Image: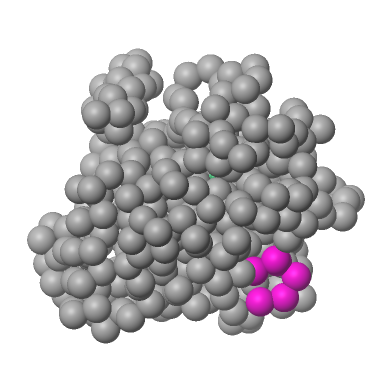
């Protein structure tokens, strides 16, 4: 149980449908590569618009980040609006905010049935400076964007909401929430199939040659190709390698809790550390707790790595067993903003949500499908965010990202 690739999530959904591998040469209007939230949403929206869509997935629906993540729906972007305004200009920042609002409404709409969807996300300040930053950001969002979902909470209210004395303050975002990510991926896949898309799993794409996508046993000749492989984009498109780094993140699930003091408000929580803790309760009352990141070799015993972090927040769980532990690969960009663009006129890509993809990737997929069908407004807003390469080239990139992460851990500890 403890070592299964998607841990608790795979154990709490029925078996997936039998793999249907691509064999032979076929045609499509849009060929989507990757069946995570981005690719499945591109397929759903492309098919709903009347296009012939084929999805090629190397493993199975939701196999990678989309079927293993923390399930937290974060409104907005990973970078604060005030920062985006000073970096990109007020109008572009406003357009990005509008997209992020559409994104969370889209997820709440698409996941409203069968995905264990719940409202409420708390950002917990790890120190006094972080709590001031949260309050400033809330005031900015209310004043300039009319966003009124945020409630600042002091230490006592935070404790009553989360069940821990670990934080001096926090901020409840009533516009956020959480869901079961693998159920959501399956839901998107069902929607895409109902709309007429065709999905092949166990069909790894080996090459993109012009407008032809090749797998081991077949090919798709497509009007447009959508690359939705997130952390793995560099393997198929070497040009993208310097723009996307990956970090391993680790999650554990406890046995169902008898202790009602843990997360009584049933919200999702993320703290403000650079290498953050994030957690929530499942529909069957387990604590799903994530913490620690690594770039190099994953640990042999994930539960042992995460448990001390969990007990620091919830010492009352000292005797509660951990029943599942798993890890996933997060695609991150240097700017921490998603990276969208075109590899050629017919090949579009979208990746690098940097830990913010549960809310943003369904909208990202929709924008990719729209751009393939000649309506690029949303896509262009995302693609206009300048991308920056990670320094270090092929050989030095890994050590440099590791060094940066280690440095951020030191900053967190100060
Ligand atoms: C452990 C973890 C926790 C996270 N927690 C959160 C969270 O709480 N909130 C949040 O907002 N975000 C979170 N994220 C990030 C979020 O999960 C991602 O941003 C989002 O799922 C990205 O979706 P995607 O479809 O773009 O990529 P993915 O879900 O990674 O999908 C890419 C797909 O492409 C397939 N693929 C790769 N190469 C090929 C190929 N050559 N041929 C065919 N298919 C291929 C893969 O098998 C995979 O299925 C987390 C990520 C991880 C890993």
Q: Can you see residue 191?
A: yes
* Residue lying at 35% horizontally and 64% vertically, measured from the top left: 153
User: Residue 293, percent across and down?
Assistant: 46, 30
Instruction: Indicate yes or no whether the magenta region holds residue 11.
Output: no
User: Residue 132, percent across and down?
Assistant: 20, 56
Q: Nearer the viewer, residue 231 or 97?
A: 97
The image's colour scheme reads one colour
Left or right relative to 222: residue 188? right
Left or right relative to 407: residue 45? right
User: Residue 12, percent across and down?
Assistant: 81, 52
Q: Can you see residue 212?
A: no
Left or right relative to 87: residue 333? right
Q: Quadrant of the N terminus?
A: top right
Left or right relative to 295: residue 67? right
Query: What main secondary structure does the magenta stretch of the protein show?
Result: loop
User: Residue 119, percent across and down?
Assistant: 55, 71
Q: Nearer the viewer, residue 171 or 16?
A: 171
Q: Nearer the viewer, residue 383 or 411?
A: 411
Instruction: Point out the stretch of residues depicted in magenta.
Output: 112-117
Q: Quadrant of the C terminus?
A: top left
Q: Quadrant of residue 401?
A: top left
Placement of 103 over or under 337, stated as above or below? below
Q: Quadrant of residue 301?
A: top right
Placement of 371 over or under 254, stated as above or below? below
* Residue lying at 26% horizontally and 54% vertically, measured from the top left: 131
Placement of 13 over or under 174, stated as above or below? above
* Residue lying at 76% horizontally and 50% vertically, measured from the top left: 258
Placement of 43 over or under 20, stated as above or below? below
* Residue lying at 56% horizontally and 41% vertically, measured from the top left: 314
Count the marks: 0
Residue ranking furthest to the front: 156
Q: Nearer the viewer, residue 336 or 318?
A: 318
């Amino acid at each position: 149980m403890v070592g299964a690739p998607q841990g608790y999530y795979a154990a709490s959904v029925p078996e997936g449908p039998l793999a249907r591998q691509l064999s032979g040469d076929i045609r499509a209007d849009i060929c989507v590569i990757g069946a995570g939230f981005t690719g499945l949403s591109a397929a759903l929206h492309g098919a709903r618009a009347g296009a012939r869509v084929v999805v090629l997935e190397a493993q199975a629906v939701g196999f990678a980040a989309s079927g293993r993540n923390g399930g937290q729906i974060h409104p907005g972007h990973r970078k604060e609006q005030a920062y985006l305004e000073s970096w990109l200009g007020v109008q572009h920042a406003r357009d990005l905010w509008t997209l992020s609002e559409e994104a969370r409404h889209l997820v709440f709409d698409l996941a409203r049935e069968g995905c264990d969807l719940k409202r409420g996300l708390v950002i917990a300040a790890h120190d006094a400076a972080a709590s001031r930053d949260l309050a400033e950001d809330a005031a900015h969002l209310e004043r300039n964007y009319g966003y009124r979902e945020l409630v600042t909470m002091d230490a006592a209210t935070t404790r009553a909401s989360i069940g821990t004395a670990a934080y001096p303050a926090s901020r409840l975002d009533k516009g956020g929430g959480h869901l079961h990510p693998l159920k959501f991926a399956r839901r998107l896949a069902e929607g895409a199939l109902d709309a007429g898309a065709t999905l092949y799993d166990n069909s790894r794409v080996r090459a993109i040659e012009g407008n032809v996508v090749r797998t081991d046993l077949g090919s798709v000749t497509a009007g447009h190709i959508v690359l939705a492989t997130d952390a793995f984009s560099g393997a198929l498109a070497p040009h993208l390698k310097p723009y996307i780094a990956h970090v391993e993140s680790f999650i554990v699930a406890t046995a169902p809790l008898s202790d009602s003091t843990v997360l009584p408000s049933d919200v999702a929580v993320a703290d403000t550390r650079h290498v953050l803790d994030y957690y929530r309760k499942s529909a069957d009352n387990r604590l799903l707790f994530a913490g620690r990141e690594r770039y190099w070799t994953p640990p042999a015993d994930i539960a042992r790595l995460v448990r001390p972090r969990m007990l620091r927040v919830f010492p009352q769980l000292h005797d509660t067993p951990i029943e599942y532990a798993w890890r996933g690969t997060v695609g991150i960009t240097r700017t921490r903003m998603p990276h969208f663009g075109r590899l050629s006129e017919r090949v579009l890509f979208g990746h690098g949500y940097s830990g913010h993809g549960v809310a943003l990737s369904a909208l990202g997929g929709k924008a990719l499908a729209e751009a393939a069908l000649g309506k690029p407004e949303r896509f262009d807003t995302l693609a206009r965010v300048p991308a920056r390469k990670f320094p270090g080239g092929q050989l030095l990139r890994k050590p440099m990202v590791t060094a940066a992460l280690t440095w951020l851990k030191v900053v967190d500890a100060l």
